[in-house]
Image (cartoon, helix red, strand yellow):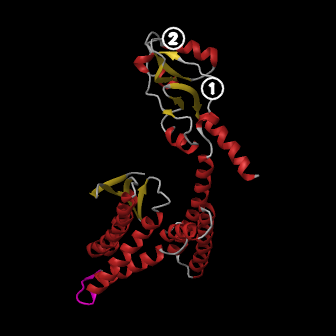
Amino acid sequence: MQSFKIARVMGIPIELHITFILLLIVVFYFWGIEGLILYMFLFTSVVLHELGHSYVAKKYGVKIEKILLLPIGGMAMMSEISKEGEFKIAIAGPLVSLALGTVLLGISTVTDYTLAEYPLFQTVGGLNILLGIFNLLPAFPMDGGRVFRALLSKLTSMSYIKATKLASTVGQYFALALLIFGLINFNVILVLIAIFIYFGASQEYRALVADTLFQDVPAKDIMSKNIVYVNSEDTVDDVLNLMLENRFLGYPVLENGNIIGTITMNEISSTTAKTAKVKEIMSPPVMVSPEAALNELIKGMANTDRVYVVDNGNILGIISKTDIVRTLSILGIKNNR
């Protein structure tokens, strides 16, 4: 769903999800302008929490795409976090919340303002303390789950996957306890949070297992070596005849022995001229090394049907989405045995 950029801090875009905007309208309807101001103070704290993560993450070379504000909180969308920096990145957010909460509570003992019948500094300060403590619980998907995993994998002989499994299991048990408590007290918010935590905890472990399995499968092991190519001077009609003959729907385009593009039914459909040359309608090729891991291939194929395995300028093989699906099916069966 759509989101709207409202600011850029430390070079990081901060966006409001459309559901967050709808929530602001609801808050204004029931609590007026004072309730809206109080709510914005709360979510400013959430932004600072996420900026804490982002600041440390950037120190470790992690790319921050954006910080997205949702009705249930904030989310810093990052590239893959290194294991070395995970502890510091994970703990930075809760520490920001705890520090901010302490400062605001200190200010509230000297002066405060009432908004929507709530003391502003005391309320926002207290909620920041709760946010920091809650996020430090040693369970996924909270920050504390990552802190817990980092400590287990560094201070014990436990492997990274086993540490993830333990933190994930703790998260699931915590979610079940929270769900029961929410049901007993008829608290819909707690029930929703429990469901979010449960699925988030299990997803973290599954994602890591899949990523670990994919790292062990290089491109050279799944590529098709039967390469049929076209020349840049070939026409659309030539390619169509080749498709009828070979039943392949995509081909690398070579010029002077070098790959310069890719031609598929998508490109051919963009023209009605059968005499149009391939080089006039081809798309840029997506190339990977023979050692590229399966998870890299999946990311690289987000906007293309095939990638080409190239070494020192020589094309060694082709990997299509069909090859990826076949490999994933085999890995799924193998992992469940």
Q: Amino acid at mark 2?
A: Asp
The answer to whether residue 20 is left or right of residue 207 is left
The residue pinned by badge 2 equals 237
The one nearer the camera, 21 or 230, is 230
Q: Which mark is residue 200?
A: none
Cβ atoms at labels 1 and 2 below 8 Å apart: no
* Vertical order, 173 against 256 (above or below): below
Quadrant housing residue 129: bottom left
Q: Amino acid at mark 1?
A: Lys
The residue pinned by badge 1 equals 225
Q: Residue at x 51, y 11 (%)?
A: 237
Measured as percent of width and height from the top left, residue 246 is found at: 63, 17
Q: Can residue 63 be seen here?
A: yes
Q: Residue furthest top?
A: 275
Numbered circles on residues, count: 2
State the extent of the magenta-drawn residues as a range.
108-115
